[in-house]
Image: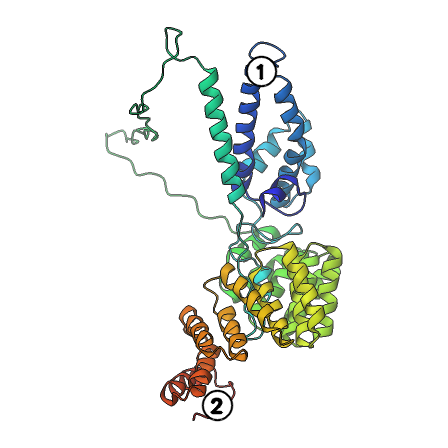
Amino acid sequence: MPYWQVLFSFRGRIPRSTLWLKFYLPVSLGYLISWLLDVQLGTSFEPGSIGVVYLAFSILMIGPTLAVNVKRAHDRGRSGWFILLFLVPLLNIWPIIELAFLRGAMGPNQYGPDPLAGPGVEEAQAAEAEGVAEQALTARYDWKPLAVLVVVLVLAAGVLLWQFLPRGKSGKETTPTPSSKPPAVTTTVPKPTIPKPETAAGEQAKPPAPPAAKPPATAAEYLQLGLKEKDPQKKIALYTKAIELDPKQAMAFNNRGFAYYTQKDYDRALVDYGQAIALNPNFALAYNNRGDAYYQRKAYDQARADYTKAIELKPDYDLAYHNRGLTYYEQKNYDQAIDDFNKAISLKANFATAYNGRGNAFFRKQEFDLAINDYNKAVELSPNWAVPYSNRGNARFEKKDFDQALKDYDQAVAKNPNYAWGYYRRAVIYNQKGDGEQARQNYTKAKALNPALPELAIK
């Protein structure tokens, strides 16, 4: 999530690390600098206390403070209204502990995907036909603005402290020499020595056995176990148990539908997504997921209707725009596809799959230079993704730039040794250049990986 969204957006979720590193740390330094400025400028209300600068900074931080705490509440699966508990004496300890120290809900919830889940559950569902695009990659956090801000604040705090704090016991300023070093500071905390329990006879007693793990008892517990489970069949069983305990659990139906989807059981996935939507008609993620299942069944009109509904419910849903663009692409409506890919990119600047998809649309319109520009961007954002290398090679092949096309195909198979299309297209190039031996080797490898590839007559 970009840094400005961390501070000013009330949508989505953020983990504890973002709260501490992108908010508490720089804001604490900001308060320190504000206090030092008040002391230096003589704007303090009382000697040594806060003043005008500190008060102004506090007012500016009201909005960002609300925004980050609302997103942390979302991460815990709670409404933003939860932060009103900060206003209640004694009870305000509850939100402090929960938002600052407890992990967010695992997996997606009604406020968005899990920010700690690695490859996004939603983006993992955006699959294109082989040779056009693959699964969307993990969204990246933009840490550069935070790093610059922290460095500036630390330097400013250091300068002010050097100007403000006394230097030497005599009251006179002392200038450190360039060779002077600060005293070493021990950063490790000594481990306390805990005496071992003894029996009456003086023997060392064995520590008590850990208590047995408590079996799950609620739908929410089964739902959490399902999110942690890697085996699809076990995930389905856990989500089924959650549904038995709470038949109105829309998220359990959605997650079980996705487990079916990963097993290519699209019929059952559609049933579960439909049930999730029936229980929660405003469930944008379920509409997007059902669109994915329709897309895999080549029911592009139905898929597009679901993606459109997801966008209506969540106007900044970059993945839904991307997926709707895929349906336009499949139906050869390339201008509409480009419009949707443009919107997805405007919402998420590092969306490699959207650049690749837009490049494919330009390719079909025979605008090869624009296609190459988009493939270049996809390669820059996802240097280990084989598909945009191969697609860029196709565009260069159409421009008769066979040497550069061959280099792209080499990169594609280097990034993914099982990428059949890369070998096939390399075979086409070698065949074009009259190198029958290399063409035959690459074609044989391609057909071994994917027997459904087109036939190629080797010269």
State the residue in front, 160 or 296: 160
Query: Could you say where residue 372 lies in the image, as x and y percent from the top left?
Result: 55, 69
Quarter of the view holding residue 53:
top right
Task: Please rate how many residues cluster around mark 1, counting C-alpha atoms within 10 Å: few if below 14, some from 14 to 19, many from 20.
Answer: few
Q: Which mark is residue 396?
A: none
Q: Is residue 293 above or below residue 18?
A: below
Q: Which residue type does callout 1 highlight?
A: Leu
Quarter of the view holding residue 320:
bottom right
Which numbered disc flags the more N-terminal residue, 2 or 1? Answer: 1
**Is label 2 in a helix, a strand or a loop?**
loop
State the residue in front, 33 or 121: 33
Q: Which residue is mark 1?
A: 41
Q: How is the image coloured?
A: rainbow
Residue at 69% from the left image edge and 33% from the top image edge: 84
Query: Could you say where residue 414 lies in the image, as x and y percent from the top left?
Result: 40, 70
Image quarter in which the C terminus is found: bottom left
Task: Please rate how many residues cluster around mark 2, counting C-alpha atoms within 10 Å: few if below 14, some from 14 to 19, many from 20.
Answer: few
